[in-house]
Amino acid sequence: RYRTTVEISFALVTSENMMKFYLATVATLLVTGAAATCMNDFMCPANSERIPNRSCYNDFDDCECIPGYYKSGNSCVTNLSSGCDKSYEFATRMNSRSCYDTIEDFDCVPGYYKSGDACVTNLSSGCNIFIDYAIRKSANCYDTIDDYDCWPGFKKQGTDCVFNNPMGTTPPENEVCGLFQCPPNSFPEVNDGECLASFDDCTCLPHYSKDGNFCKCANTYICPENSKPIPGRKCYDDFDDCECDSGYLKSGEGCVVGELQAETQWTNIPLPVQTFYVPLPEKQIKYDTFKTISGVTNGWIRSTISLSVGVSGTVIWYDHMEDGFEIDVTAATISATTQIWGDGNIANGCAPGSPCNTNEDDILKSGQVIILESDVDVEHPTGHDWDGGDCIKASWPIAVTRGEYPQQPGSLLAGAVEVLDTKKWGTYFEAPVGQDLITDESAFEYVGMYAMAGQPATTVTIKDKNGSTLQTCTLDKGESCNRRVKIGDSMTSNKPIQVDILAGDVDSRYEMRWYSVLPVDKWSKTYLSPVGDDVGESRCVIYNPTDSTITVTYKEGASGPDQQLVLNSKEAKQTEVINKGSAAYITSPVNVIVFSMTDTVNTGMIFDWGFPVQPLESLSPQVLVGWGYGCTDNSCTSHTGEDQARSVVWIAPTEDAICQVDFDNDGEMDVSYSIGKFVSFHIVDETDQDMSGAMIVCKDSYPDGNGVPFAAAWGQDPTRSFSNDDDALDMGTTVMPYDSCYTQDFVVTNEDGTTETFTRTQNLGFGIGCGDIESGGFEDTPPVETSDPPEEFIPVSIPKAGGEGDGTTTTTPATATAATAPETTTTTTTTTTTTTTPA
């Protein structure tokens, strides 16, 4: 196994015993020489993989055949075509068996055991009772409450696990209250520590009334003359549910001719307020990451890009990298491969998933989710895939998620990240984890740090924590480079970049976690992680970037005891397990960064996923879920034969809150929950198991309460998954905060050459006013974005001189003042005025 250089002086040997002595000495030196090193250069042949946890891989003895194959000489062959291809339900094949024809050639999946010629759990005979807020013990049958442990903060009461109080307070006389869920179109009304125990404790939304155990809308309102019902509403009960016909305006409770519109009109030109570049190009991911984690990686790379629309009327520009980027996506003439979605013109593009028959089909609506999937052949690329390096721009905030996995071994080796718009990029990053971070499950045996540029001639320099340069790369727009790193290694750049970290267990076949990384100047002293789990044993990893030793404090839930981690300079450590039902609240004397990781038990390969925890001050009272599939290919079938999402959305409010969910983001809430401060709570759309595009809003009371910021993440729930579950997506992401209101500054150049600056504030919240946020959870005015300004001019609409009212507009080059304004803060708006003076 080892190679070393041994110098031996030979002399004339006259004795057979002396010769044996020399030969024995040589053999000993070759095997045990202190200077020996392992070359680790042996590649396992087809249909085999390295045996885990070997210290050296130097020949075929260090390999094992994959299920269905057995060793024959120096290769793995199959005998499955000759009667050895038997399968058993709830069982997985053992490695390196030459034939699979009896139960002894299989291992039962967790929760099952061998009985005769089968793997059984008694689940088929009434032993599969499911209890909310409970964790199954190790048992062969689950038919009573005794076969379960309740979540932390819950206790057994009769046949259920119940919570002391949904709002996190102790009820009078220590009474235990059930966590009743109010039905759609209603919200819980819990005051002064009362119990939420039945539908009597729920209040119907405005215009709804109680009918049995549900809230129903009478739907008796008729829109007045010259108006019609707004499409997509579930309840039509007053004039707010109507829209005026073309040429009419709302006035009181009716629609009148829009006479004032005939004098002077502004034309609305949608301009980008967000810019994204799709990170992690497939070829680099396949060869630098996937193949390092799993030697059986093969075939195409499934690329998934999810775009969730938060505001109706949003326009999205999709610009492929393959043929170069547009100078200005709003220009009159752009490349035929650049798609424009939502502008009412199917000739220049229509969002995948839309009918795309008429121009009316090219209008994006809130809640619409655009899933872009390509099976990318990195060896023989053709055409324009939806893939890494592409540029996406949007006229209103959207949520973008990026996911990938290889054809082999499939979605059990998968990763995803939230994509950050260019306003969140930076020029200095540090690696909070690295290949020198030792964990029981070897989660960081491989750590790759990826950088992507958004501007030409971007220089990225990677240094170790002592300041020595390790690598330098020069990137064009949409290009990426990466390097394996240790804790404290840094990335600096002359222009803003986005950075992601991919971590995994080398040769584990499945274990991997992905993280987007904020630049160091956006790190914080306070964090809230919404994921607590006992089965996958979720933990947080905290990194100290300073030159001094610090003590970081964290607690589980609002009332948990303080726990501490002492971190030396440039050191990262794991917390203890964050238990089910508890969020992790973390405070530090200096700015740090925090990652969450799930499945820190045993091999860490079954429920492995992670996400970057967001700073507390960046949280908002509403989020828009990006990619939120419940299962692989959005198709869920559990091992019990029932549909069950494997991945959920986890949330944790910063104060006691009533949280509502609009699963389809159609403007009407579907369900409400009362959730206590720092409680980890998961949400599932039981209708289709898909949380993509859902809007979640939290307030301190309903309907007129203040917004309560909360943390959110999407990822695998270990209590809903099992080993070798091909329907499970071993991945997760942060669900980024979504602005409740959005402010735009714009500059207009008048015909006489003068300029004027205006501000428009758009309320994007569900009943959350722009002044209702108690803590700074959103960015009122986007910062000046210097990373991607228009390179020639900014189009600005102005009314035609004289104000004849025909709506004709002129586009003029911006002056020096306007030219310095970023595309994220320069726009036009539609106004109605009685004056005929040009603006």
Image (cartoon, helix red, strand yellow):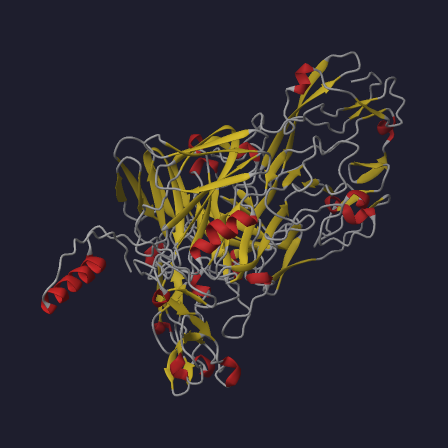
Q: Nearer the viewer, residue 329 or 247?
A: 329
Residue 131: percent from left, percent from top: 43, 69
In the picture, residue 263 is in which quadrant? top right
User: Which residue is at a point 42% across and 75% down the rendered structure image?
Assistant: 70
User: Which residue is at a point 57% across and 45% down the rendered structure image?
Assistant: 703
Q: Nearer the viewer, residue 758 or 496?
A: 496
User: Which residue is at a point 25% across and 53% down the rendered structure image?
Assistant: 4
Q: Nearer the viewer, residue 293 or 179?
A: 293
For the C terminus, the quadrant is top right
For the N terminus, the quadrant is bottom left
Whether residue 434 is visible here, answered yes or no, is yes
On the rendered structure, is 206 left or right of 100? Answer: right
Residue 594: percent from left, percent from top: 39, 42
User: Which residue is at a point 28% across and 55% down the rendered structure image?
Assistant: 3
Residue 586: percent from left, percent from top: 35, 42
On the rendered structure, is 772 left or right of 373? Answer: left
Q: Is residue 625 above or below residue 511?
A: above
On the rendered structure, is 558 left or right of 794? Answer: left
Q: Is residue 161 above or below residue 446?
A: below
Residue 706: percent from left, percent from top: 52, 39
User: Outermost residue toward the bottom?
Assistant: 116
Whether residue 191 is visible here, answered yes or no, is no
